[in-house]
Image (cartoon, rainbow, N blue to C red):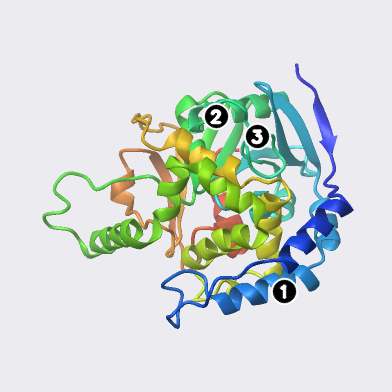
């Protein structure tokens, strides 16, 4: 069995000095000719964020905070995978596997790991291949299916014969695939259920279905350009993201603004430090291209259409990218638990940790 190695986040002073120089030498575009975010993240806010990143943000303090968790790496299929493995003090702890997505990272879970430990759960949070401190695949083939198989291998390697899996965004797709493959997983939970309108819905939709269809239409028209670029030309995009910290910052923070339940501004929900913590995991590891390749690997390929038969819990947050009614999801999952949340968006654990924790606990307590 492959070894599991302790890992400590230790960014070099040279990397931080390089970031400082690049921020100081940013060549800025002209200001947008509108007074809102309709053309993208506004110049004034970007300058404010970049100035804080350069002069106010304390990476060493943030690095220390992330290092309070137990980090490890292990080789799976020739790729070094980074993960947090934080054990509960309870002898009957039930293991939970959390998978992030794009443009997120393990940082999304920093507010829920310890409370879940206290509630009797061991928590495992891997970084997707090409994301964070995980290695970057040098060959094609690391799509959703392979990641799901790798995650099951990881859990078995950590000594778990049964576990639960949770995810949103790409984590939702990986978690669903884990549920399909079963392996050692006994139940799944998602905050981004995958569903589609059943036949006839477009002829006479309910009010809930009308809202869902409007959200789909908005996403396709105004919010999906990033995915088209990342699924078709991730390498081309990567040159700018890996070279320019402000470019990487804008590419990520604009999506946090768009996908969070934040009343028009990302800092209404997350602190400036939290936003930058997440961006740093992309910048420090030059992950602009490698993270985008998951779209190239996965889009345009026929997915597994089988339904998940494992017990499935869903936390439906009102500002999720696509607000899919339960009736659209029933054919894809064995839904035994559905919670309609009062607030929150795409980055559920990051935005609304208390709601997220309560729902995860309530669902997985039924199978522990």
**Helix, strand or loop under label 1:** helix
Residue farthest left in this picture: 203
Nearer to us: label 3 or label 2: 3
Tell me the distance, in whole angstroms, between the alpha carbons under discs 3 and 2: 10 Å
Residue lying furthest bottom: 35
On the image, the x and y values in percent for residue 162 come to: 62, 29
Q: Is residue 10 toward the left or the right of residue 190 in the image?
A: right
Q: Is residue 314 above or below residue 298?
A: below
The spot of residue 248 in percent (x, y) is 61, 57
Q: How packed is label 3: few (under 14 Cα within 10 Å), some, or many (20 or more)? A: many
Identify the residue under disc 1: 51
Give me the residue at 32% from left, 62% from top: 218
> Who is closer to the viewer here, 336 or 6?
6
On the rendered structure, is 17 left or right of 312?
Answer: right
Q: Residues within 10 Å of mark 2 (few under 14, many from 20)?
A: many
Q: Give whichever of discs 1 and 2 has the lower sequence position.
A: 1
Residue drawn at the location 65% of the way across and 34% of the way down: 136
- At 44% across and 59% down in the image, what residue appears? 320
- Residue picked out by circle 3: 136
Q: CA distance from mark 3 to mark 1?
A: 30 Å
Name which of mark 3 and mark 2 comes first in the sequence. 3
Residue 216 visible in the snapshot: yes
Disc with the residue nearer the chain's start (3 vs 1): 1
Judge whether residue 365 can be spotted in this image: no
Q: Which residue is mark 2?
A: 142
- x then y, percent, for residue 207: 23, 65
Q: Nearer the viewer, residue 10 or 64?
A: 10
């Amino acid at each position: 069995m492959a070894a599991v190695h302790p890992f400590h986040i230790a960014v070099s002073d040279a990397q931080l000095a390089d970031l400082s120089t690049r921020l100081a030498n940013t060549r800025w575009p002209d200001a947008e000719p509108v007074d809102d975010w309709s053309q993208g993240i506004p110049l004034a806010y970007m300058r404010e964020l970049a100035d804080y990143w350069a002069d106010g943000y304390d990476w060493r303090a943030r690095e220390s905070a992330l290092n309070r968790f137990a980090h490890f790496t292990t080789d799976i299929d020739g790729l070094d995978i980074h993960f947090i493995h934080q054990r509960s003090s309870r002898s009957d702890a039930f293991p939970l596997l959390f998978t992030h997505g794009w443009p997120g990272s393990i940082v999304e879970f920093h507010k829920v790991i310890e409370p879940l430990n206290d509630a009797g759960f061991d928590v495992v949070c891997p970084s997707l291949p090409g994301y964070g401190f995980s290695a970057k695949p040098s060959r094609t083939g690391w799509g959703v299916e392979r990641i799901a198989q790798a995650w099951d291998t990881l859990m078995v390697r950590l000594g778990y014969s049964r576990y639960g899996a949770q995810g949103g965004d790409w984590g939702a797709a990986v978690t669903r695939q884990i549920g399909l493959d079963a392996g050692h997983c006994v139940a799944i939970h998602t905050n981004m259920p995958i569903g589609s309108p059943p036949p006839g819905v477009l002829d006479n939709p309910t009010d809930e279905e009308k809202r869902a269809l409007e959200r789909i239409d908005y996403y396709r028209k105004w919010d999906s350009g990033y995915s088209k670029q990342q699924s078709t030309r991730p390498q081309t995009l990567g040159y700018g993201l890996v070279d320019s910290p402000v470019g990487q910052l804008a590419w990520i923070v604009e999506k946090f603004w768009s996908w969070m339940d934040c009343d028009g501004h990302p800092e209404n929900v997350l602190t400036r430090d939290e936003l930058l913590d997440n961006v740093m995991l992309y910048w420090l590891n030059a992950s602009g291209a490698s993270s985008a390749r998951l779209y190239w690997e996965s889009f345009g390929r026929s997915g597994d259409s089988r339904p998940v038969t494992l017990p499935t819990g869903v936390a439906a947050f009102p500002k999720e990218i696509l607000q899919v009614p339960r009736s659209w999801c029933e054919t894809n999952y064995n839904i035994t638990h559905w919670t309609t949340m009062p607030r929150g968006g795409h980055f559920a654990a990051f935005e609304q940790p208390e709601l997220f924790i309560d729902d995860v606990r309530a669902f997985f307590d039924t199978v522990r």
